[in-house]
Amino acid sequence: MTTSGEAVRRPIRSRPGALGLVALAAIGLGGFVASVSSAPSWPNVRRDIATRFHSVAAVDTRELASWLANPQREQPLLIDVRTREEYEVSHLPGAVWAATAEQQAEALRKAKPGQPVVLYCSVGWRSAEAAVRLGKKRGRIVLNLDGSIFQWANEDRPLVTTHGAPARVVHPFNRMWGGLLDRSRWSHEPKS
């Protein structure tokens, strides 16, 4: 439950698929590496995140958009856990950048007491890792944005640059993960 009493979706537990087993076995550097021979798909990515981070509560993009549009509801602290380069291309309006555990803890210290926190990255893996760490803080509702910025952008939801100007493109992370982002939204052609 959120502070306003509205329910949030919790990921369901499931067994990882073949891609998931490869991904779970290759965790590292703030994300997971899938098999080079198979491109990730949204159902597999969501299932793998739910399996690996079953204790992390999630909010989907539709729910978050509605939440942000409701001035009667306490607004969440949005934390973008991607790299600085990714954040500077575009991010959700009002989001703060905090890529490292130390930066995330500092952002949490600056939040209002009891303010809900929504974390996001490209697809939800790095932000789920951060949610596990930050979710241990007492009295905090820490949620992972299901589908993260790629899903948000795919749905044509608002994005901004570091200067606050509207943005339409997103850093694709790399060619493989960028496959989950509408190609017209890529900020550049990734090298790998």
Image (cartoon, helix red, strand yellow):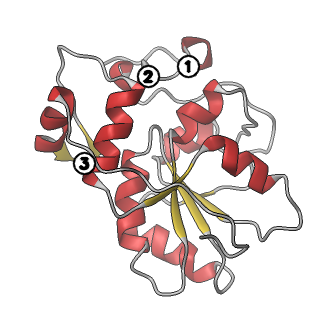
- Which numbered disc, 1 or 3, marks the residue that appears first in the sequence? 3
Q: Which residue is mark 3?
A: 29
Q: Which residue is mark 2?
A: 178
Residue drawn at x 31%, y 56% as measured from the top left: 53
Q: Is residue 70 above or below residue 25?
A: below
Inspect the image, locate mark 1, and give the three-letter code of the amino acid beneath it.
Trp
- Which numbered disc, 1 or 2, marks the residue that appears first in the sequence? 2
Q: Which quarter of the picture shows residue 96?
A: bottom right
Q: In the image, 96: left or right of 58? A: right
Q: Is residue 134 above or below residue 154?
A: below
Q: Is residue 74 above or below residue 126?
A: below
- Circle 1: element type: loop
Residue drawn at x 62%, y 25% as measured from the top left: 154
- Circle 2: element type: helix
Which residue in the rendered view is the most extreme toward the right?
71
Q: In the image, 162: left or right of 51? A: right
